[in-house]
Image (cartoon, rainbow, N blue to C red):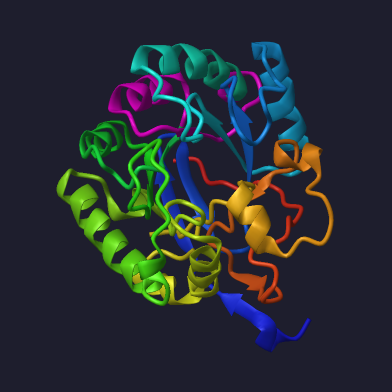
Amino acid sequence: MRLSDRVSAPRVSLRTSAGTFELGERPWLMGIVNATPDSFSDSGLHRTLDDRVALAAGLLAAGADVIDIGGESGVTHQPPVAAEEEIERVVPLIERVAGELGALVSVDTYKPAVAMAAVAAGAAIVNDVSGLRDPDLADVCARTGAGLVLMHTRAAPKEKLLDPALDGLVVADVDAFLRERITVALDRGVAFEQLVLDPGPDFGKTPAQTVEVLRALPALHALGRCSWRSPVRTSSARSPAGRRGSGWPGPWPRSGRVSTPAPMCCASTTWPRWPTSWPYAPHWPARRRSIRG
């Protein structure tokens, strides 16, 4: 691969409640473990706590740097889960994955009560796919020191939104939205070094808009943190929209939906420009590097 085919991102430090991590040498890989019975990505294949811990262990062995644990599926045909039930789902899993396995854990939630319980159980990052609709979530991260992922989406949780009017405008919308969310988080006491930005592929976007956003990742480095995909994180969609837009020529491997770590593209110093028909970055093997603070 030619050097001219690579995209560079600045190196930054990400501050979390588990320590400070130096990002930028390479992409980070995120392994997804769902504590849900109805996730689109694994169809409830891992139903017991032991099954989910074993899955997390396998993901770490395969090279995952972070284990992302969620207790509410993003599917839009099911109602939201009560915070109490979500806590019951994720806390025992986080305790074992962070404690027994020693993993860096993020919790996928938009509910402040769940985030607080998850961080107390050992989660170091709060992965908010709602775009900080509830600013109290930022208060949790300010108090605990947990990292905070701010994701672009115009859709409310559990809402499906596909707006063709954003064709050709979605990158500008992502930039403006994330800048405004950064301001909200900072005003709530979250340090800039705690922030991770996610342009939200497949969240409130058509497949074409998702591709448009992913191709613009280098421009989003101007937000001041680099690209989880400020870092900028990519959500590696294995949703139906993502598969339709990917150009993948064959059937999507079922085992890859969960057992293969999703590309975090977290603060990658260099990663290749993939073909225009393939909007999602490949999975690079990686080893975790951290600086404990």
Q: Which residues are magenta?
A: 98-123
Q: Is residue 116 magenta?
A: yes
As drawn, which residue projects farthest toward the right? 250
- Front-most of 56 and 217? 217
Q: Relative to 52, say whether 270 is above or below.
A: below
- Front-most of 238 and 144? 238
Q: Residue at x 36, y 27 (%)?
A: 115
Residue 177 % position (x, y): 28, 61
Q: Residue at x 59, y 19 (%)?
A: 37
Q: Relative to 144, say whether 230 is above or below.
A: below
Q: Is residue 146 left or right of residue 262?
A: left
Q: Relative to 184, say whether 206 is above or below.
A: below
As drawn, which residue projects farthest toward the left? 187
- Front-most of 44 and 273? 44
Q: Is residue 281 visible?
A: no
Q: Relative to 62, say whether 279 is above or below.
A: below
Q: Is residue 154 magenta?
A: no
Q: Is residue 245 left or right of residue 173?
A: right
Residue 29 % position (x, y): 64, 49
Q: Number of callouts in the render? A: 0
Q: Residue at x 81, y 44 (%)?
A: 253
Residue 262 % position (x, y): 65, 47
Q: Is residue 196 visible?
A: yes
Q: In the rendered image, which quarter contains the C terminus?
A: top left
Q: Residue at x 27, y 49 (%)?
A: 191
Residue 142 % position (x, y): 25, 38
Q: In the rendered image, which quarter contains the N terminus?
A: bottom right
Name the quadrant containing residue 47. top right
